[in-house]
Image: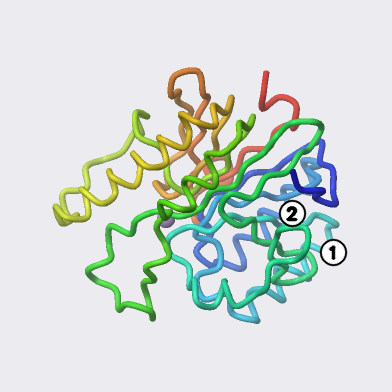
Amino acid sequence: MSNFPIDVERIAFVGDIHANTRYMETVLTLAAQEAADVVVQVGDFGYNFLDDFLNKIDEVSKHVGIPVLFVDGNHENFDRLYSFPVSSDGVRRLRKNVLHLPRGFRWEWQGIRFLALGGAHSVDRSWRTPFIEWWPQEQISLGEALYASGQQSDVMITHDCPDNVDIPLSSGSWIPEVDVHSANNHRKLLGWVVDEVQPKHLIHGHYHVRYTGKRGDTVVNGLGMAGQPLEESMMVVNTKDLVK
Ligand SMILES: [Mn+2]
């Protein structure tokens, strides 16, 4: 278990940001108004992680005194993201106040056990240029799934949604059949990890729709995206309420 160097009583979760600097500024402002100790972003955060984006988020984050933690999504430049080293405490510091939670990273806040597991399949992959607009590291590998499944946790923070959850989506008839298949397989693999970890709560992004559902005994919260009203993209909670 990581000795993650902050404790957190109140968390502002936020959905896909897609490198939208101005939206992130608004998120941090609301997080401060809501007395959150930290912003936890659920993937599709920085895309190319440009210096201008990271510097601005770091500056606003320091100004309001709220660090930004994120799991990776699928629309991220993984070559750039993984060029930042993992610190001895297990996270990537892209800036002093902007931290990546790698897949399988575990920590505790308020005695509650958290597990990060980013990644998803891009169903728009066919329209993207490999290694410029799309990266194969986007999917959870079998090794990452095995590593993440090794221990129970109370809360999972993911980008994709596990299988056996009804997401209130409009139809995606534009998606090629092979990518429907790959996306479903990815959800199954994540679902297998969830079966092993048995979290009480799972929070995810990727589908750009705010809803609350269940998967067995696990409460599932899906978050909206940048551009939508903040009540669609954000969920601010007391840490201890996640396991009630
Ligand atoms: Mn996504």
| Label 1 CA crowd tier, 10 Å (few <14, some 14–19, many 20+) | few
Question: Of helix, strand and loop, which one carries label 2?
Answer: helix
Inter-mark Cα distance, 2 to 1: 10 Å
Q: Which residue is drawn at the image coordinates 20% and 48% (left, top)? A: 181
The answer to whether 170 is drawn above or below residue 52 in the figure is above
> Which of these two is toward me, 76 or 89?
89
Residue 161 coordinates in the image, percent (x, y): 42, 40
Of the 4 image quadrants, the one containing the N terminus is: top right
Q: Is mark 1 within 8 Å of ligand 1?
A: no
Q: Relative to residue 120, is residue 57 depicted above or below?
A: below
For the residue marked with disc 1, what is the amino acid? Answer: His
The crowding category of the residue bearing disc 2, from other C-alpha atoms within 10 Å (few below 14, some 14 to 19, many at least 20), is some
Q: Is residue 170 left or right of residue 187?
A: left
Mark identifier at residue 29: 2
Judged left or right of residue 170, residue 143 is right
Work out whether residue 88 or residue 24 is closer to the camera in this orientation and state it.
Answer: 88
Q: Earlier in the sequence, mark 2 or mark 1?
A: 2
Q: Which mark is residue 122?
A: none
Task: Give how far across and how far down residue 221 sits, in percent.
Answer: 51, 33
Instruction: Please state, as top left, top right, bottom left or bottom right, where the C terminus lies in the image.
Output: top right
Question: Mark 1 sits on what residue?
Answer: 63
Q: Judge whether 241 appears above or below 158 on screen.
A: above
* Three-letter residue code for mark 2: Thr
Q: Residue at x 80, y 31 (%)?
A: 111
Give the image quarter of residue 66. bottom right
* Callout 1 secondary element: helix
At 62% from the left and 33% from the top, the residue drawn is 155
Q: Left or right: where does residue 125 sit relative to residue 207? A: left
